[in-house]
Image: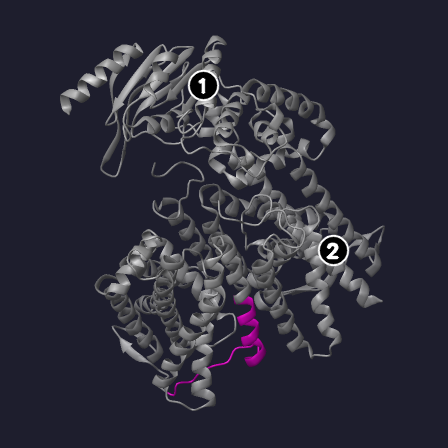
C-alpha cells in the first residue's frame, strides 16, 4: 500500500513537471533540456531555505519558485533570438551548468554528499503523513494542469501557438514575443521548482544525481510520448513512463540493473514514438519542419 | 601560472577534437546529434576493454576505441538516421531521436560496466613530464599532440580532398550533392565516420587521463559544442581558437576563484557568442538577418 | 504621417539602401516600383523595424521609430505583409485574424488565468474579426485552416490580419503577385476602398498597369536609391526612358 502511494506521488510530481515543460516545448515549440535544472533549483532552494533559515514548507516552496523564475530568464532571453534547434543547445548547457554548480558549490549545496534531513511539511502543527502528502502532490499536479490549460486555451495561448509557427509574423501583428516567452518560461520554471520543493520535503534527502541531463531527457520524453501540446498528453506521458518501468521491478531484476533497464526503456520508447507517431499518443504538435 | 596554461591547453585539445568531429557531422546532417556524447564514451570504454580486460598495449587500445566509435556511429546512421532522412523528418525530431539513442547507449554502458568510475592505467609515466615549468602527464601530451594532428588533418581533408569539399558543399546547400552525382548518403556517412572517429579518439585519450564514467560524454560534448559556437560550424581554425578560449577561461577561473563557477562562465561565453555570431545561429527569430 | 530621412543599409558589400529620403502622405495609395534587388523590401524591413538602418531615421508622426522593435512599430499603427506570404497555416482563418487584434487583456498572464476577465472582450474581438473577414470576402472560410486556402485567399487573409491590428498605414509587399486575376482585382478594389476610408497604403508591385490605375503617388527605386517619385504615369515614363538609355 505504501508502495502504491509512493508511485502515485511520483506520478503526481512528474505530471507537474510534464505540464510545466509542455508549456514551452509543446505550446511554444521550444525543445528545452533544462527542466530538471529548474526541478533541482527548486529542490535545493527549498531545502536550503528550510534548513538554514527554518522557513516552513509553504514559504520554502514560494522561495523555490521565486528563485527559479529569476533563473528562467537565463534561458528565456536567448530563446527570443535563437532558432529553435539552437535553443536546445542553450538549454542543454544551462542544464549541465546547473548540475555542475550543484555538484561543486560545496559550501552551499554540499556537492555530491547532498542535503539530508530536510523537514517534512508541517500542517496544523503536525508533520504531514504519506497519504496527506499525496494529496498535496496531486493538488500541485491539478494546479499545473489548470494553469497550463487556462493559459493555452485563451488569447495568451493563441499568441504562443502563433509564435511557435512564425515568430516574425507574430511580431508584425504587434505581439511582443519577448514578453510571451519570458512569461511562459517563468511559469514553467515556477511549476517545476514547486515540484522540486515537494520532492525535497517528501524524500528528505536530495543530491545532484537526481537533477541531471538524463532526468531532463526523461521529462521531455514523457511530454513527447504523451503528446506535446495536447491537453492531457503530459498526464498520459507521466503515467506511462512511471508505470511501465515499474513492471520491470516485478520481473525481479536487482535494483542496479533495473535502474539501467528502466532508462533504456525510456530511450527506446522515445525513439519508437518519434519514428512511428511523432505527435505522441494524444498529440497535436509534432515539431515538424516549418 | 604555466600549470594553468598547460592544463588549459590539454583541456582545449579534447574540446577541439570533439568540436571538430561534431561540426563535421553537423555540416552534413544539419541537426544537433546528441548521441555524439555516447560515441565519445563508447570509444573510451572499448579502449578500457582492450587494455584492462584483453591486455592490449595502449596504441592498440586507441585504435580499438576509434574503430568502435566510428562503426557504432556508422551503424546508427545506417539503421536509424538514414531511413528518417528519407521520410524528410524535421531536424527537431532527429534531435529528439538522438537524445533517445544517447539515453539507451549510456544506460547500456552503465549496465555493463557499472555506474561508478573505472580507470585505465596505461602504465606510462605517472609523474609526467616537465614542459616549460608545468607538469604534463603522458596522456595530456598525447591529447595535445592528437588535438593538433586532428586539427591539421581535418582542415586538410576539408580543403584538399574531394569528399571534404563535397561535405562543405552539402553544408551550404543540400541539393548540391545530387548535382555532383555523389549521393548525399555517402557524404553523410563519410562525415559521420570521420567525425565519430575523432570523438572516439577524444574519448580514449580522456580515459587515459582521468576516470571513465558512463556520463563522461556529455561534459566533453558541452565543451566541444561551445568551441564550435565560438569558432563557427566548419571553421576548423575558429573551433581551435574557441577551444583554447574555453580551456583557458575554465582553468583560470578554477584556479583563481573556484571550480564551481567555471561552468557558469562557460554558459555566459556560450550565450555571448551565440548572440553576436552572425551566421548560422541567429535565425529569423527576432530581426531579419540577411534579406 | 510616415517619413524617412537618408536611410542607408548595406549587407556585406552590397548597398541595399542608399540615402533614401521619402515623405508619405497621411492617406492614399503609394506604389513602390523597381527591379528586383532595388531595395524595396529592405525599405519595408527598415520602416517596420525588422532591420536597423546603418544610418538615417524613420518617423511616424512626430515619433522617431528608427530601430524600434517590430512589435512596437506595429502597435503604433504601421502594419505590413511579407513578400513570402506569412500566416499561421496551422490555425484557423478566424484565429489568424484574432491574433492580430491589439491590446487583448486575455494576453496578459494574470487575466489569462481568469477567463471571466476577458470573456466579453473576446466576444467583441470575434465579431470585429468576422467583420474584417467579411470585408475581404473570406467570411465563409472562417473555420477553415489557413493552410487550406488558395494562394489568393491567403493574401486576402494576410491583408485582413494587417487591418485587424487597426493599422493606419499598411506596407503591403507584392499584394497581388502570383494571384489569380479575379482575386487580384478584388485586392485592388479593396486597396482603393481603404484609401477612401483614410488609410495610407504603400505597396510594392511589379504590375505597372495596376500601379497606374490605383495610386496617386509612385516611387521608383533602383540600386537602393530613389530614382523618381511623383505622378505614376510620369514616373513610369521616366523609368522606361532611363531603361532605354541604359539599355
The part of the image, by quadrant, that contains residue A211 is bottom right
Q: Chain of mark 1?
A: C
Q: Is residue B141 above or below residue A132?
A: below
Q: Which mark is residue A12?
A: 2
Query: Would you say B259 lies left or right of A44 here?
Result: left
**For this rendering, which residue is in front, C178 or B5?**
C178
Residue B103's spot in the image, x, y percent? 56, 67
Q: Which mark is residue B286?
A: none
Residue C234's spot in the image, x, y percent? 26, 10
User: Circle 2 sits in a helix, a strand or a loop, which is it?
Assistant: helix
Q: Which residue is mark 1?
A: C185
Magenta highlight range:
B102-123
Q: Chain of mark 2?
A: A
Q: Which residue lies at the image location 18% right of the left edge and 17% below the top edge?
A: C241
Q: Is residue B165 above or below residue C194?
A: below
Residue C70's spot in the image, x, y percent? 45, 29
Amino acid at each position: 500500500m505504501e508502495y502504491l502511494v509512493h508511485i502515485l506521488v511520483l506520478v503526481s510530481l512528474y505530471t507537474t513537471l510534464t505540464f510545466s515543460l509542455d508549456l514551452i516545448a509543446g505550446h511554444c515549440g521550444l525543445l528545452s533540456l533544462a527542466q530538471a535544472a529548474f526541478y533541482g533549483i527548486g529542490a535545493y532552494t527549498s531545502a536550503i531555505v528550510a534548513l538554514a533559515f527554518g522557513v516552513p514548507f509553504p514559504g520554502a516552496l514560494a522561495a523555490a519558485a521565486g528563485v527559479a523564475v529569476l533563473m528562467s530568464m537565463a534561458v528565456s532571453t536567448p530563446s527570443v533570438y535563437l532558432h529553435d534547434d539552437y535553443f536546445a543547445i542553450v538549454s542543454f548547457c544551462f542544464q549541465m551548468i546547473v548540475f555542475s554548480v550543484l555538484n561543486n558549490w560545496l559550501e552551499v549545496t554540499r556537492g555530491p554528499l547532498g542535503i539530508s534531513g530536510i523537514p517534512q511539511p508541517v500542517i496544523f502543527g503536525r508533520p504531514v503523513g504519506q497519504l496527506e502528502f499525496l494529496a498535496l502532490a496531486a493538488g500541485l499536479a491539478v494546479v499545473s494542469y489548470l494553469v497550463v490549460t487556462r493559459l493555452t486555451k485563451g488569447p495568451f495561448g493563441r499568441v504562443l501557438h502563433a509564435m511557435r509557427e512564425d515568430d516574425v509574423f507574430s511580431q508584425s501583428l504587434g505581439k511582443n514575443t519577448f514578453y510571451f516567452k519570458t512569461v511562459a518560461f517563468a511559469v514553467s520554471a515556477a511549476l517545476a521548482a514547486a515540484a522540486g520543493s515537494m520532492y525535497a520535503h517528501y524524500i528528505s534527502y536530495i543530491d545532484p544525481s537526481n537533477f541531471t541531463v538524463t532526468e531532463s531527457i526523461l521529462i521531455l520524453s514523457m511530454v513527447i510520448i504523451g503528446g506535446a501540446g495536447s491537453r492531457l498528453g503530459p498526464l498520459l506521458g507521466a503515467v506511462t513512463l512511471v508505470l511501465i518501468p515499474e513492471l520491470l521491478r516485478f520481473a525481479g531484476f536487482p535494483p542496479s540493473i533495473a535502474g539501467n533497464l528502466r532508462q533504456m526503456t525510456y530511450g527506446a520508447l522515445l525513439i519508437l514514438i518519434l519514428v512511428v507517431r511523432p505527435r505522441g499518443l494524444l498529440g497535436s504538435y509534432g515539431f515538424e519542419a516549418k | 601560472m604555466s600549470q594553468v596554461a598547460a592544463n588549459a591547453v590539454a583541456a582545449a585539445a579534447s574540446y577541439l577534437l570533439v568540436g571538430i568531429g561534431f561540426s563535421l557531422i553537423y555540416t552534413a546532417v544539419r541537426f544537433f546529434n546528441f548521441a555524439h556524447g555516447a560515441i565519445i564514451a563508447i570509444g573510451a570504454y572499448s579502449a578500457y576493454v582492450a587494455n584492462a580486460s584483453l591486455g592490449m598495449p595502449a596504441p592498440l587500445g586507441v585504435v580499438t576505441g576509434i574503430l568502435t566509435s566510428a562503426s557504432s556511429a556508422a551503424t546508427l546512421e545506417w539503421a536509424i538516421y538514414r531511413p528518417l532522412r528519407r521520410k524528410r523528418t524535421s531536424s527537431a525530431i532527429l534531435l529528439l531521436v538522438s537524445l533517445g539513442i544517447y539515453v539507451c547507449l549510456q544506460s547500456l554502458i552503465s549496465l555493463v560496466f557499472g555506474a561508478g568510475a573505472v580507470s585505465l592505467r596505461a602504465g606510462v609515466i605517472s609523474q609526467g613530464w616537465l614542459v616549460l615549468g608545468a607538469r604534463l602527464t603522458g596522456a595530456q601530451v598525447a591529447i595535445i599532440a592528437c588535438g593538433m594532428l586532428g586539427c591539421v588533418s581535418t582542415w586538410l581533408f576539408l580543403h584538399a580532398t574531394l569528399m571534404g569539399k563535397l561535405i562543405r558543399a552539402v553544408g551550404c546547400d543540400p541539393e548540391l550533392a545530387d548535382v555532383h552525382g555523389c549521393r548525399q548518403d555517402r557524404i553523410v556517412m563519410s562525415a559521420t565516420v570521420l567525425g565519430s572517429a575523432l570523438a572516439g579518439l577524444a574519448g580514449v585519450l580522456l580515459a587515459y587521463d582521468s576516470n571513465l564514467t558512463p556520463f563522461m560524454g556529455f561534459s566533453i560534448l558541452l565543451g566541444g559544442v561551445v568551441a564550435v559556437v565560438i569558432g563557427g560550424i566548419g571553421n576548423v581554425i575558429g573551433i581551435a581558437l574557441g577551444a583554447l578560449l574555453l580551456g583557458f577561461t575554465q582553468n583560470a577561473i578554477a584556479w583563481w576563484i573556484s571550480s564551481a563557477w567555471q561552468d557558469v562562465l562557460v554558459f555566459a561565453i556560450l550565450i555571448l557568442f551565440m548572440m553576436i555570431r552572425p551566421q548560422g545561429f541567429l535565425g529569423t527569430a527576432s530581426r531579419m538577418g540577411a534579406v | 504621417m510616415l517619413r524617412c530621412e537618408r536611410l542607408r543599409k548595406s549587407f556585406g558589400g552590397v548597398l541595399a539602401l542608399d540615402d533614401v529620403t521619402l515623405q508619405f502622405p497621411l492617406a492614399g495609395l503609394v506604389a513602390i516600383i523597381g527591379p528586383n534587388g532595388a531595395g524595396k523590401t529592405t525599405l519595408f524591413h527598415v520602416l517596420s523595424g525588422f532591420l536597423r538602418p546603418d544610418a538615417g531615421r524613420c518617423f511616424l508622426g512626430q515619433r522617431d521609430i528608427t530601430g524600434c522593435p517590430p512589435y512596437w512599430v506595429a502597435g503604433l499603427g504601421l502594419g505590413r505583409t511579407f513578400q513570402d506570404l506569412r500566416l499561421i497555416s496551422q490555425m484557423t482563418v478566424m484565429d489568424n485574424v484574432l491574433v492580430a487584434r491589439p491590446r487583448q487583456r486575455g494576453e496578459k498572464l494574470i487575466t489569462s488565468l481568469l477567463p471571466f476577465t476577458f470573456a466579453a472582450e473576446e466576444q467583441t474581438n470575434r465579431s470585429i474579426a468576422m467583420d474584417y473577414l467579411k470585408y475581404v470576402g473570406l467570411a465563409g472560410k472562417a473555420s477553415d485552416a489557413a493552410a487550406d486556402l488558395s494562394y489568393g485567399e491567403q493574401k486576402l487573409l494576410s491583408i485582413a490580419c494587417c487591418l485587424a491590428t487597426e493599422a493606419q498605414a499598411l506596407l503591403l509587399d507584392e499584394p497581388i503577385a502570383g494571384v489569380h486575376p479575379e482575386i487580384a482585382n478584388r485586392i485592388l478594389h479593396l486597396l482603393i476602398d481603404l484609401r477612401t476610408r483614410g488609410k495610407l497604403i504603400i505597396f510594392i508591385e511589379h504590375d505597372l498597369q495596376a500601379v497606374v490605375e490605383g495610386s496617386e503617388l509612385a516611387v521608383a527605386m533602383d540600386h537602393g536609391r530613389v530614382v523618381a517619385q511623383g505622378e505614376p504615369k510620369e514616373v513610369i515614363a521616366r523609368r522606361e526612358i532611363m531603361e532605354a538609355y541604359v539599355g
